[in-house]
Image (cartoon, helix red, strand yellow):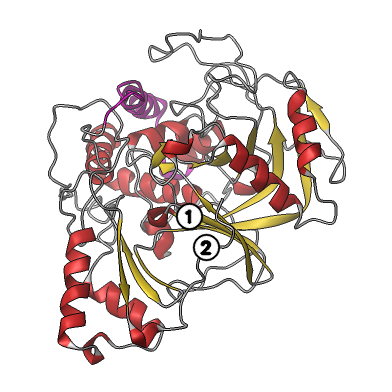
């Protein structure tokens, strides 16, 4: 049950120990296998109680959610999700256990200390998940389970909507995150107020797309490592890691944005503009402090930086601050962006097959520019840029495929990017080569999504 909160600015001490975490590093779904966790206050709002699960998901943003075993592990830690799967899909306890074993093994085999040569990709992780789930419950139930996971993972925007126009500029107050651009923006009534360079989820733990919402700032989140083989070194299973500790992966502040993701601190500056989290938006501690101040300013009772730092001084006491108004969070995956008169093409890091001529035409058309109207030299440069960025984090080509889960029902293999298996068992931490290419076109002058403002 969600916690009751005082008005914004009133602080509620939490005496519940933060539980073991399903994703390595602790920035995702709390794990219910051990001590009862400090529940995300948005949990109730995000639970889908409809027991009729469709065989396919019509919403494109939902259907494009890549389902990996680590993601499934997080979902299977939620008993409400498990009960819904049992009821609506008729999955037995034995089958649930098979799914849990496969998902848990996948998480335990990932090593956070991976290097840039590590090779698991989003598509290969999706392919492995598909094979494991089909082996456990069969293809027909697999399709329905994937649909249920996608619906949950897409989240709840609290009544906000997403425009179908590419690179759209919000007209309301919301947070916009574009994963391939490693960028997060705060809009207030349609005006861009602040931008942040961010760290995004590893390819094995991709940042989702769709609408979420934030309503609470949690100061001094503690972390209790679970009793798992990957817990080693200076931390011990069951021993609480205090807020402010260098060993706490959450940093001084976490902001839930719906299961199983967070916006949180604790990241080093060199992890910004690259992979840095397990399905979350990662920030440095100064960034997350500033972000907390900025989103509180959207309320009638904003927090000052001095107040934020005062809260953090009491590191042994976790505090929650309830925002007066829920803020929608729009999670995008746009690799082709018209920004302030320039065309930017970002690397397809999650291998969604988005850097295509068809998608380029769609984006240009949205700003009144036809690809065919450009001179041949410009067209050739744009097409070369598409090809250059139609690669994954390791530089392997990505085939055009808008929905990485589309072949689940037919039990057809997904063709992942070409990768070696030498580093299997580690997350892909770094990106090889350029992350974007930029073109200036006279036809786009004065058009597009706004350039970053006060980039933090």
- Give residue 55's position: percent from left, percent from top: 36, 56
- Please, is residue 48 above or below residue 286 in the view? below
> Does the CB distance between marks 1 and 2 fall below 8 Å?
yes
Q: Name the residue under label 1.
A: 183
Q: Is residue 58 in view?
A: no
Q: Mark 2 points at which residue?
A: 452
Q: Give 423 or 105, whichever is nearer the viewer.
A: 423
Q: Residue at x 34, y 67 (%)?
A: 344
| Image quadrant in which you'd find residue 255 | top right
- Give residue 89's position: percent from left, percent from top: 41, 43
Q: Give 241 or 206, whichever is nearer the viewer.
A: 241
Q: Residue at x 17, y 58 (%)?
A: 399
Upstream in sequence: badge 1 or badge 2: 1
- Please, is residue 145 above or below residue 317 in the view? below
Q: Give the range drawn in magenta.
A: 88-115
| Image quadrant in which you'd find residue 346 | bottom left
Secondary structure, mark 2, is loop
Q: Give 270 or 92, whichever is nearer the viewer.
A: 270
Q: Residue at x 48, y 33 (%)?
A: 268
- Give residue 422's position: percent from left, percent from top: 14, 27
- Please, is residue 180 above or below residue 284 in the view? below
Q: In which quarter of the image is the N terminus?
A: top right
């Amino acid at each position: 049950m969600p916690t009751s909160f005082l008005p914004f600015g009133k602080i509620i001490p939490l005496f519940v120990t933060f539980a073991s975490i399903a994703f390595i590093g602790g920035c995702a779904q709390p794990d219910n296998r051990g001590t009862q966790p400090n529940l995300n206050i948005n949990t109730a709002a995000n639970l889908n109680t409809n027991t009729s699960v469709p065989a396919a998901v019509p919403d494109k943003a939902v259907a494009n959610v890549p389902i990996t075993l680590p993601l499934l592990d997080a979902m299977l830690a939620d008993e409400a999700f498990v009960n819904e799967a049992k009821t609506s899909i008729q999955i037995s306890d034995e089958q649930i256990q098979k799914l849990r074993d496969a998902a848990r093994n996948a998480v335990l085999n990932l090593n956070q200390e991976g290097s840039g040569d590590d090779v698991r990709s989003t598509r290969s992780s999706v392919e492995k998940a598909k094979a494991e789930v089909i082996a456990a419950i069969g293809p027909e139930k697999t399709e329905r389970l994937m649909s249920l996971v996608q619906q949950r993972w897409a989240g709840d925007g609290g009544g906000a909507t997403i425009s179908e126009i590419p690179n759209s500029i919000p007209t309301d107050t919301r947070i916009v995150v574009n994963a391939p651009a490693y960028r997060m923006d705060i809009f207030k009534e349609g005006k861009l107020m602040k931008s942040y360079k961010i760290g995004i989820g590893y390819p094995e733990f991709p940042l989702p797309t769709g609408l979420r919402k934030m309503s609470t700032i949690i100061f001094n989140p503690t972390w209790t490592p679970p009793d798992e083989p990957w817990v080693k070194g200076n931390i011990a299973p069951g021993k609480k890691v205090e807020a402010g500790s260098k060993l706490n992966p959450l940093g001084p502040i976490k902001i839930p944005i719906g299961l199983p993701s967070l916006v949180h601190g604790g990241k080093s500056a060199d992890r910004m503009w690259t992979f840095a989290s397990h399905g979350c938006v990662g920030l440095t501690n100064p960034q997350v402090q500033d972000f907390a101040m900025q989103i509180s300013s959207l309320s009638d009772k904003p927090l000052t930086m001095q107040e934020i730092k005062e809260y953090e001084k009491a590191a042994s006491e976790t505090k929650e601050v309830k925002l007066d108004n829920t803020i929608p969070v729009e999670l995008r995956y746009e690799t082709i962006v018209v920004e302030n008169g320039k065309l930017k093409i970002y690397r397809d890091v999650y291998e969604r097959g988005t850097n295509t001529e068809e998608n380029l035409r769609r984006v240009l058309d949205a700003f009144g520019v036809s690809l065919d109207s450009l001179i041949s030299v410009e067209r050739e440069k744009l097409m070369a840029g598409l090809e250059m960025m139609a690669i994954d984090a390791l530089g392997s080509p990505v085939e055009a495929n808008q929905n990485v889960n589309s072949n689940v029902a037919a039990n057809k293999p997904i063709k992942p990017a070409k990768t070696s298996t030498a580093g299997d068992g580690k997350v892909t931490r770094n990106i090889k080569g350029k992350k974007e290419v930029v073109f200036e076109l006279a036809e786009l002058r004065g058009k597009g999504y706004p350039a970053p403002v006060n980039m933090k």
